[in-house]
Amino acid sequence: MTVVTVYVVFANADEAEAIGRAMIDERLAACINILGPCRSIYRWEDRIETVVEVPALFKSTLALADTLIARIADLHSYDTPAIVVWPIDNLLIGYGDWVGESVG
């Protein structure tokens, strides 16, 4: 089993928490860390936008990553949310076991 982190940016903390709780309830993620607000600057529909967003880190497995991404995208308020998978090269064995037991 391979543990991954799924990075997602949300419109606000309430959305991050609601979707995070749903992903844990559906056993697609073992955990979500909701981080503090950040300022994002990006191009959208040919304009440069500046907004405050809330990044979050989901812990899951590589086997569930595609399903987790699709489910988050279904629930997300953005048309094209930032959802990316970061591999984890090394981790505490007990932590990996906990993630595996918490999902699936």
Image: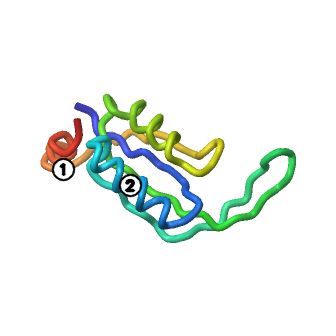
Q: In the image, what residue occupies the spot 45% across and 66% down?
A: 35
Q: Residue 85 in the image: state x and y as whole percent.
A: 45, 39
Is residue 63 found left or right of 13 in the rendered image? Answer: left
Identify the image quadrant of the C terminus.
top left
Q: Residue furthest right?
A: 46
Tell which circle, 2 or 1, labels the residue nearer the N-terminal end: 2
Please state if 66 lies on the left or on the right of 59 as rendered.
right
Circle 1 packing at 10 Å, graded few (<14), some (14-19), many (20+), is few
The residue positioned 42% from the left and 30% from the top of the image is: 66
Tell me which residue sits at (73%, 59%) in the image. 41
Question: Is residue 5 shown above or below 61?
Answer: below
Give the residue pinned by disc 2. 20
Q: CA distance from mark 2 to mark 1?
A: 19 Å
User: What is the x, y in percent for residue 82?
Assistant: 58, 46
Which amino acid type corresponds to the residue marked 1 in the rendered image? Tyr
Front tag of 2 and 1: 2
Q: Secondary structure at mark 1?
A: helix
The label number, if any, that marks residue 52 in the structure image: none
Q: Position of residue 9 (x, y in %)?
A: 55, 54
Would residue 64 be found to the left or right of residue 19 on screen?
left
Can you identify the residue that label 1 sits on?
A: 95
Residue type for callout 2: Gly
Crowd band around label 2 with a 10 angstrom C-alpha radius: few (<14), some (14–19), many (20+): many
